[in-house]
Image (tube, grey):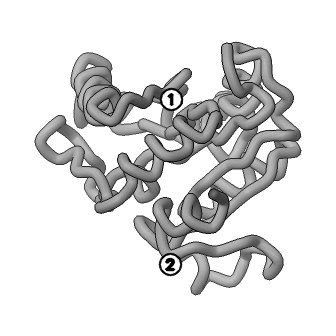
């Protein structure tokens, strides 16, 4: 697989697509944040390997099925394919927080799983997220971290628990502009 030394792991809701406190429950509700698909395509064409790590407890809550989640991810993959780009891996945790699984962020299980499946060094990866959980999972895995203001980003920044030295960008597109 190409570009594994340049792995970017993206949170989904609030980074790639619009977020909702009521969960994104259907393909129709899965709406990309303006510029996010193009930003991902630019990363891909610059030689980065893209992966997604997303908590999806809506499955355990019965809000949507694995099939509906797969359809949302097919929509994402289709939008990227229209730009000649692709995601190497989409990892998701379907569990509730009470399950105490190893995969649900803030635990680093998905980060380690992505790195292992792609043959990458997680400590060389950058995680792009919008929540404290995203940063905690990245930090626990030893990965770099970038915070965006979209999704839960503004709330997370106002909370004051993120380290002050974390790079903050308005959205994924602005991060990609600065990176490339």
Q: In the drawing, does residue 26 fall left or right of residue 129?
A: left
Residue at 57%, 32% in the rendered image: 51
Instruction: Please say if the residues under marks 2 and 1 sit with CB atoms less than 8 Å apart.
Output: no
Residue 13 image label: none
- Badge 1 crowding class, 10 Å Cα cut-off, few under 14, some 14 to 19, many 20 or more, is some
Q: Which mark is residue 92?
A: 1
**Viewer-proximal residue among 87 and 53:** 87
Residue at the location (44% across, 41% down)?
41
Query: Whole-Å distance between the Cαs marked 2 and 1?
Result: 23 Å
Asked if residue 83 lies left or right of residue 116, the reply is: left
Q: SS at mark 2?
A: helix
Residue at the (55%, 65%) spot, across then down: 177
Asked if 95 appears above or below 8 in the picture, the reply is above
| Tag 2 residue | 155
Quick one: SS at disc 1? Answer: strand
Q: Between residues 32 and 54, which one lies in front from this camera angle?
A: 32
- Is residue 23 depicted above or below 52 in this figure? below
Is residue 65 something one can see in this rendering?
Answer: no
Sequence order check: which comes first, mark 2 or mark 1? Answer: 1
Horizontal and vertical percent for residue 64? 23, 31
Question: Is 144 placed left or right of 168 in the picture?
Answer: right
Residue 128: image x %, image y %? 61, 54
Number of disc labels: 2
10 Å crowding of disc 2: few (<14), some (14-19), many (20+): some
Q: Report the quarter where the C terminus lies.
A: bottom right
> How far from the left and from the top, in percent, is residue 36?
39, 54
Which of these two is toward me, 105 or 175? 175
Please tell me which residue is depicted at 58% across the width and 56% down the height of the picture.
Answer: 129
């Amino acid at each position: 697989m190409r570009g594994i030394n340049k792995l970017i792991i993206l949170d989904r809701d609030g980074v790639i697509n619009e977020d909702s406190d009521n969960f994104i429950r259907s393909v129709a509700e899965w709406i990309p944040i303006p510029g996010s698909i193009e930003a991902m395509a630019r990363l891909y064409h610059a030689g980065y390997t893209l992966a997604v790590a997303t908590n999806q407890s809506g499955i355990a809550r019965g809000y949507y099925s694995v099939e509906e989640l797969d359809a949302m991810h097919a929509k994402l993959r289709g939008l990227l394919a229209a730009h000649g780009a692709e995601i190497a891996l989409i990892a998701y945790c379907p569990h509730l927080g009470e399950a105490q699984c190893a995969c649900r962020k803030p635990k680093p299980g998905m980060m380690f799983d992505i790195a292992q499946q792609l043959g990458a060094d997680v400590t060389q990866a950058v995680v792009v997220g919008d929540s404290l959980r995203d940063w905690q999972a990245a930090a626990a895995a030893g990965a770099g971290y970038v915070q965006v203001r979209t999704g839960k980003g503004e709330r997370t920044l106002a909370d004051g628990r993120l380290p002050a030295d974390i790079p903050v960008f308005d959205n994924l597109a602005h991060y990609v502009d600065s990176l490339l």
